[in-house]
Image (cartoon, rainbow, N blue to C red):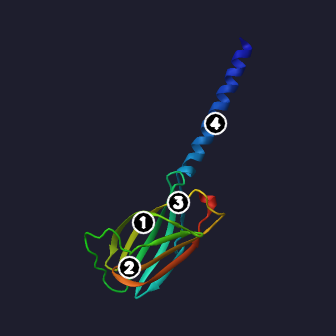
Amino acid sequence: MRNLSKYTVQFIGVALSICLLFGLASPTLISAESQSNQGLGSAEDNGIKLTINGYSIVNHGQNIRVHYTIHSNSNIQVNPNATSLMASPHIWIGQTLVRENSDSFKKVSKNEYKGTIEAQLNHYRPENPQMTFITHGILNQKGHWTVRFILNNAEY
């Protein structure tokens, strides 16, 4: 009987250690973030500045959410039915174009919007790839905005 309780205690100790390990690791698997007070990069054209504030890796590494700010020198008027502030944004990770799933945004001042674009990540990514965000239209203004930054693999 004494040997049985020794093995039971060891089993419970191992089980608790495994639960603790997964409990601490799970938030990292579900979501990772990279943000900077100055943003990861920005581009300006036609008086409109696009800043990539940061990104979040969500859904167990399946999706990336790119957080952005759009600032204009003039009052921004957006159609209330608009689903996006940008015309066909392209998100490249290394040499791979990733598919955009959704775009959400909100007005934070008369000259500024903040938003998030979610895209699907591919499973095979190079080590710390360069991410490139490109659009040729913001707020119904044609132009060229390209922002590049490094996607840190340690964060997902």
68 vs 77: above or below: above
Do the numbered discs 4 and 3 sit on residues whose CB atoms are within 8 Å?
Answer: no
Which numbered disc, 3 or 1, marks the residue that appears first in the sequence?
A: 1
> Residue 33 — which label?
none
> Residue 121 — which label?
3
Looking at the image, which residue is at 61% across and 64% down? Answer: 152
The amino acid at mark 1 is Thr
The amino acid at mark 4 is Ile
Looking at the image, which residue is at 48% across and 76% down? Answer: 134
> Residue 138 — which label?
2
Q: Which residue is mark 4?
A: 18
Q: Nearer the viewer, mark 1 or mark 4?
A: 1
Which numbered disc, 4 or 2, marks the residue that appears first in the sequence?
A: 4
Which numbered disc, 1 or 2, marks the residue that appears first in the sequence?
A: 1
In this view, the residue farthest toward the top is 1
Say which quarter of the image contains residue 21: top right
**Alpha carbon separation for disc pair 1 and 4:** 35 Å
101 vs 44: above or below: above
Rendered-image quadrant of the C terminus: bottom right
* Residue 58 point in image, percent of width and height: 50, 55
